[in-house]
Image (cartoon, rainbow, N blue to C red):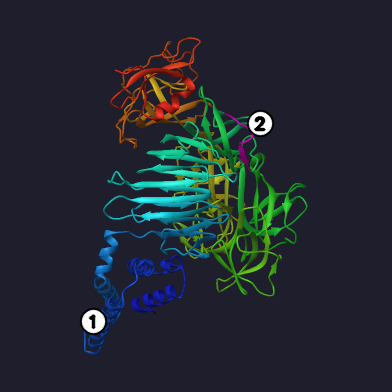
Amino acid sequence: MTDDSDRLQEALERLEAGESLEALLPHLPEDEARLLKLAADLKSAPWPALSPGVAAAQKQAGMRLVQEKKHMSSSKSSIPRWAWGGVALAGGLAVLFVCVLAGAGILWWRSTTVQGTVVQSVRGLVEVQAPDWRPARPGEPVAAGTHVRTGALSGATVALGDGSVVRLGPDTEITFTTLDTPANGPRVVRLNQVKGESDHTVAHSANSASIYEVSTPAGSGVAKGTVFQVQTAAEGGSRFDVQEGAVAVSNGAATVTVLAGQFTQVGLNEPPAAPSFRVTGEGVVTSRGDVWVVAGRTFATNAATTVVDDPQIGDWVTVEGSLLPGGAALAERIVLVRRASVENQFAFVGLVDSVSETQWVIAGRQVNVDAQTQIDAGLEAGSLVRVDGRLGEGGALWAVSIQEVESSGFQFVGVVQSIAADQWRIADITVTVGVSTTIVPGLKVGDRVQVNGEIQPDGTWLALLIQPVKVTTFDFVGVVIRMNPWNVSGVELATDADTDIDSGIRIGNRVHVTGRVLPDGTWLAETITQVDEGQRHAIQFTARVQSISPWVVGGVTVTVDSKTKITGDINVGDLVLVKGNLLPDGSVVANEITRVSEAAGCMEAAGVVAAVNDHVLTLMDGMTVTVTSEVKVTGDLRPGSVILIRSCLNKNAQLVVVSITVLYQLGDHKTQTPTGTETPTPTGTLVTATATETATPTATGTLVTPTGTPTQLAPGEQKVTICHNASKKNPHTITIARPALPAHLAHGDTLGPCP
C-alpha cells in the first residue's frame, strides 16, 4: 500500500508532467490536496526575473538546506517514515521561502509599483499575442500591449493586479493597452475591445485619479468601482450595460452617464443614445409573433430582435430587452431554454427483455411503441437502452424514442484547440486519432466539430469520427470522478435546477450524460443516468399526484417507504418528479418524490419612482405599482429612487410583484447599491410629485396600467419640470420635453422645481 509521502510525491510528479490538478485532487486526502493546490499555485505564480547575484545567493541557501537534510536523514531517528514526506515538502517550501526572501528587493519593487495581471482561467480556444498568437495558459502574466482573444464556445478570465476582473465571452478580442495597478497611487487601466463581449468587475480605488476605461470602435466607457458589460457588434456599434455603479460613455464630444440598471448603445461616429432601463427574465411563452408574451409580460419585437432556437408556445425562454416610454417592453434577445412542459414525461435506462411490433419489455416493464417511436437500428434482447416517452392512461408507458446506450461511447461538440499527428485537443479534451479515425478534410484550429468515439479501458478518448457541425450537444458514458461540481471521465460538467440526476450515484459509477454546450464553452448536463450493473432499472417521471395513500402518480402506483425522500408540501393534484427503481414485476419503488414548481416565470425591470402615495408607487414611465406587506422592499423608497422590480406569475396567471430593491437615489453622488433596510411596507411620503388621479389598488402586488399621469405633465402636454444642476452650486428650475428626461436624470438633475 502506498504511504502518504509516496502518494503525495507521485501526485507532484504527475502535476509536473502536465496532468491537471482537477484530475489529481479527488484521489488525495484533504490535507494532501491542500498541499498539492499550494504547489500548483506556486508553480503558476508569475515571479519577476532574478538578477545573477540574487540567483547565486538563492542557490547557496538551497544547497545548505539540502546538506542539512542529508545529515538529518543519515542519523538515527524515531520519526516514522510517513512523517518524512511532510519534512521533505516543508524543506522544499523552505527553499522557496528563502528564495523569496533573497529576492526581497525585487519583490519590494513589485509591491510598490505594479502588481501582476494574469490569465486566471481559460475554457476552449483562448490565445494571447505577445508578440505572436499562441494558446493561453492559466497563470501566465499579462502586460501592457498583450492581446487576448477567444474562439467560438470559449471564454477566459483575466485577474488584474488591483483586484479587478475581466471575463471574456466567445468570439471576443481585447487588448490591454495600459496596465498600471500600483499598491499605492492611482490605478490606470485601459483596454481596447475589438469585438465580442466582456464583463468587468472593477475594484474600488480610494484614489480619485484612478482610471478604468474600455474603448471600442464606437465610443468608450470610464468606470470606478463598477460592474458592467461591453458588447461590440460585427458592424462596429457597441453597447454598455451597467449592473452596479456608473459608467461615463463617450463618443466624440458627447458623453452620457449610465447608471445601474441602464444601458446605452453607440453607433459608429454617433453620440451615445440616452440611457434606457433594462428588462430581463425568463418564463413560459404564451404568445409569439410580432408581439411575444413571456411570463405574463408583453414584449414588442423588431427587425433587430434575435430569436434563438425557434421557441414555441409552451416553451421556457429567457428574454432580454429594454423599457420603452409608457412602460412597454422591447425584446432584444429571446433564447430557448427548454421545450414545453415535462408533465407526464418519463425516462429510464434498462436492459431489453423482449421485442415485438407493438410492445417491448424493458427492465421488466411493458413499453408500448408505434409508428412514431424512434428506435435505433440493431436493438435486440439484451441491449442496454435509454427509453424516453410519455405516460398514457392508467400509467401506461409509450416510448417516443429507444436509443442504445454504448457502454464506452461518446459524442460531443467543441472547438478545435490544437492538432497533432496522434492527438487533437477539442473542448479541453484530448482525443487520440489513428488509422481508425475518420477526419473530414480541411478542419483547422478554431473550427467547431462533432466528435464520436469510444473511451478506452485506460481512460483514453479514442476518436472514430471528427466532422464539422453546428449543433451544440454532447452525449457520452463515463466514470464519475467528482460530484460537486460534477466531473465525469475528466469532463467538467455544470448542472442547474433542470438537470435530471439519478439518485444513488456514487464516485466510481458509470453514468450516461447528455446535455448542451453553452456559448462560453461550459458543458451543461441535462441528464445524468446511472448505467452500472444493478442500477440499470432506475426510472424517473414527472406527473400529477392522483392519490397519496396509497401513492398514485400519473396512473403509476408508487411504493413509498421509510427510505423515500419527499421534498415539498405535496398534495393531490400537485406536479411531482418521481425518481426510483423498476422492480422485476414492473412496479416502481420511489427513492425521491419532489414537488415541481409550476411558476410560469419571473421578470426584472428597473424604473424611477416619480411619486409615493400611500402604498402606490408611480413610476416615471407612467406605470403604477401597488406595494403590500407581501412585497419584500429593500431600501428607502422615495421620489427619485431608481428601483429594481421583480415580478412573477402566480398560479392564477397574475403578474405579482415579489420584491422591490432600491438601487440608488438620483441626485446622490454615490451610486452604489445601498444596504437598505427591509420594510414590509414603505412609509415614504410624497415630496416632489403626486398623481392627478388616485391609483386604484388591485389584487395584492399586481402590476397595473395607470389611469393618470404625474402632475408635472399638464393635460395634453409633454413637458416636465426639473431642477437642473441640483447637486451643484447653481441649481435652477427648467421645463424640458419629456423624451429628454432620462438624459437629465442620468446627469444628476431631479424631478420637480428646485427647493
Q: Earlier in the sequence, mark 2 or mark 1?
A: 1
Instruction: Check disc 2 and give the amino acid type.
Output: Gly
Q: Which residue is at the front of the view, 471 or 251? A: 251
- Residue 303: in magenta span: yes
Query: How far from the left and from the top, in percent, is residue 222?
Result: 40, 43
Image quadrant occupied by the N terminus:
bottom left
Which residue is at a point 44% across and 55% down the rendered structure image?
Answer: 176
Query: How far from the left and from the top, in percent, is residue 405?
Result: 64, 60
The 10 Å Cα crowd at callout 2, few under 14, some 14 to 19, many 20 or more, is: few
Question: Which element carries disc 1, helix, strand or loop?
Answer: loop
- Residue 685: in magenta span: no
Q: Is residue 133 above or below residue 254?
A: below
Would you name the residue on which mark 1 appears?
Answer: 79
Q: Which residue is at the front of the view, 200 or 393? A: 200
Magenta residues span 299-308
Question: Which element carries disc 2, helix, strand or loop?
Answer: loop
Which residue is at a point 41% across and 74% down the rendered structure image?
Answer: 11
Classify residue 538 by image quadrant. Answer: bottom right
Marks 2, 1: nearer the viewer? 2
